[in-house]
Image (tube, rainbow, N blue to C red):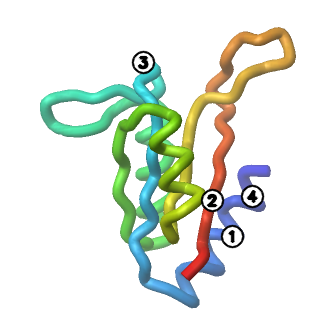
């Protein structure tokens, strides 16, 4: 699955130089706000991927309802959050929703 996501973003880099907007929730240690911006393990992974494929990006922490509203209505917005397992507990494997309408 991670390879599929990487291929998707690589195809975007050839077609667009649009800024990808990642929106996430407060969920330490994966995603959390600091005085210097957003930090955490998931944020670090996104930064590494985006740097590797040379695409501009921003990461912002918002309440989930607002994050999903952006993903559904704004181009190049992605909700990134830890996944929930079948038992109802969260994992750091991640899930996302991406809108690329123009």
Q: Residues within 10 Å of mark 3 (few under 14, many from 20)?
A: few
The 10 Å Cα crowd at callout 1, few under 14, some 14 to 19, many 20 or more, is few
The answer for how far apart the CA atoms under marks 4 and 2 are is 16 Å
What number is the disc on residue 98? 2
Instruction: State the image coordinates of residue 58 (x, y, percent, origin top left).
Output: 35, 57
Q: Which residue is mark 4?
A: 3
Q: Nearer the viewer, residue 91 or 101?
A: 101
Which of disc 2 and disc 4 is earlier in sequence? 4
Q: Position of residue 92 (x, y in %)?
A: 62, 26
Mark 1 vs mark 2: give the one in front. Answer: 2
Instruction: Give the CA separation, mark 2 to mark 3.
Output: 23 Å
Residue that appears at 42% across and 41% down: 44
Labels 4 & 1 near each other (Cβ < 8 A): no
Of helix, strand and loop, which one carries label 4? helix
Whether pointer 1 and pointer 2 mark residues with C-beta atoms closer than 8 Å, the reply is yes
User: Dot 3 corresponds to which residue?
Assistant: 28
């Amino acid at each position: 699955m991670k390879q599929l996501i990487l291929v998707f973003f690589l195809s975007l880099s050839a077609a667009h130089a649009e800024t990808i907007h990642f929106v996430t929730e407060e969920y330490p240690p994966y995603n959390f706000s600091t005085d210097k911006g957003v930090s955490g393990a998931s944020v670090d992974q996104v930064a590494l991927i985006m740097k590797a494929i040379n695409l501009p990006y921003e990461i912002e922490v918002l309440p989930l309802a607002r994050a999903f509203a952006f993903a559904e209505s704004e181009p190049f917005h992605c909700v990134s959050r830890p996944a929930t397992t079948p038992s109802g507990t969260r994992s750091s494997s991640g899930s996302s929703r991406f809108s690329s309408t123009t």
